[in-house]
Image (cartoon, rainbow, N blue to C red):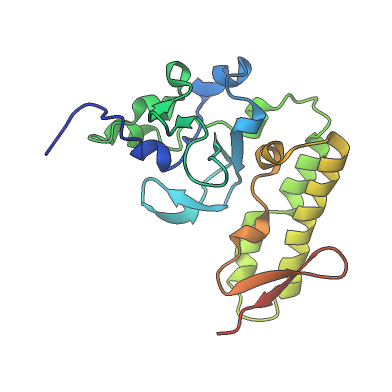
Amino acid sequence: MTFDTCRQCGTCCRKGGPILHHEDLILCEKNILAFQHLITIREQEPVFSPLSADIEPAPRELIKLSGINGTWTCLFFKEKNQTCGIYQNRPLECRALKCWDTGELERIIYRHTLSRRDIIAPDKPIWPLLEWHNEHCQYGKLAALTLQESDVESRIAIIINDDLSIRQRALTMFNLNLAEELFYFGRPMFKALPARLAVRPNRRGGLTVYHKEV
């Protein structure tokens, strides 16, 4: 059976919140979308690509709506009646999405997207920490190391522990909650390690990287 109108089944909303575009900046300026509603996908971070339906490195920094309690379901999806909590102010991708014809959405994917620089005021005192994090904790560096077969655990550990350290410093300095941390810094980098690598706490208060036994 074919259809050409939304059935309010909630499937699209459960697959994840949308990426934000420049047309959505007004929603941030009006505080309809606040920092705690957003999560940053950093450049080269492994993410699900809606174009290939596979996990691929993000082509650039992206901002998207967070999920509910660590799930993919969009933060604003109301499960009880399967409606959107900000429907009249929903982002561009939500307005473009038609599950019976994805052409319009596919044409705007990754085009004119927002980054943290578009949303965070340039004089915000957290910027020096973000700049340090961007320089020293790059997903491109992490990916290059994980492709090597041996003797990389200590070098990978430096990156993921630097990532955790700067987050802790920001939490202390600016009293961030978890939702705000995920906007400012994205998800912790150790969560993007390949399946053959794992982490465990060490005596220094950081993480040790090791190869899983097969």
Question: In the image, 196: left or right of 200?
Answer: left
Q: Nearer the viewer, residue 41 or 144?
A: 41
Residue at the image point whose x is 55% and y is 19% from the top: 27
Residue at the image point whose x is 76% and y is 73% from the top: 154
Residue 104: x and y, percent?
Answer: 31, 30
Q: Nearer the viewer, residue 138 or 153?
A: 153
For the C terminus, which image quadrant?
A: bottom right
Residue 43: x and y, percent?
Answer: 59, 47
Figure check: 99 above or below 25? below
Question: In the image, 173: left or right of 102?
Answer: right
Q: Quadrant of residue 93?
A: top left
Residue at the image point whose x is 78% and y is 36% from the top: 176
Q: Nearer the viewer, residue 159 or 178?
A: 178
Q: Quadrant of residue 202?
A: bottom right
Question: In the image, 196: left or right of 127?
Answer: left
Residue at the image point whose x is 45% and y is 30% from the top: 78
